[in-house]
Image (cartoon, rainbow, N blue to C red):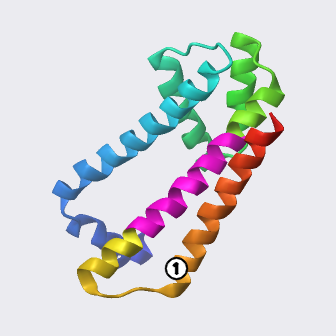
Amino acid sequence: MANHRQEFAIIFTVDYTLMLPLVLCCFLQFAVNGLFLKLFTGVFGIKLCMGEWLGLAIATTMGNYIAPLKSALLGKAMYLKKRYNFAYTDFASITLGFYILSFFLGGLMGLLLSGMVFFLYGYLSPKFIIMFSLVCAGMAGILQLGRLCS
């Protein structure tokens, strides 16, 4: 650190009033991920209390920073298996459903924000529109395929 004082000095120039919204956004992300877990496990008859769904969301996120390859998901699956006898295949299905829904919503948000940029600044990127449209269409197709198979 002694050799890199200039690189670390920039930390002290950060406006700390911006930290509160960033921290709130992190907690909002934990809450949304936890609520999705509560919603998806509720379909299987599992009722998670707030400490569980929020705790599992935080532990999984922090574990993924430490362990490679999203291996904190295994910890979540093991917890649900031990506590609620929740099958690993069911856990895999809710995890896959979460990712499909996340990609679909990400594509939809990309389309909405592209439209907003167009109306505010008059700029439209056809590459972004095509990419976000393909993501939305692909995920919607997968969701419909799942509906037809069930």
Q: Residue at x 31, y 52 (%)?
A: 22
Give x and y (percent) for residue 130.
58, 78
The residue at which mark 1 appears reads as 128
Residue 67 vertical position relative to residue 36 in the rendered view, above or below: below
Total numbered circles? 1
Quarter of the image for the N terminus: give it.
bottom left
Expressed as whole percent of the image width and height from the top left, the position of residue 148 reads: 78, 41
The image quadrant that residue 88 belongs to is top right
> Which residues are drawn in magenta?
96-112
x, y percent for residue 48: 55, 16
Q: Mainly helix, strand or loop, the magenta region?
A: helix
The reply to whether residue 68 is in sight is no
x and y percent of residue 36 in the render? Answer: 53, 33
* Residue 76 placement, left or right of 6: right
Left-right relation of 143 to 121:
right
Residue 99 visible in rendering: yes
Quadrant location, the C terminus:
top right
Q: Residue at x 54, y 24 (%)?
A: 38
Instruction: Decide if residue 136 is on the left or right side of residue 88.
Output: left
Asked which secondary structure carries label 1, the reply is helix
Going by the numbered disc 1, the residue's amino acid type is: Phe
**Residue 99 lies in the magenta-colored region:** yes
Establish if 136 lies above or below 42.
Answer: below
Residue at figure coordinates x 50%, y 31% from the top left: 34
Residue appearing at x 49%, y 14% in the figure = 49
Residue at the limit of the structure toward the front, as seen here: 148
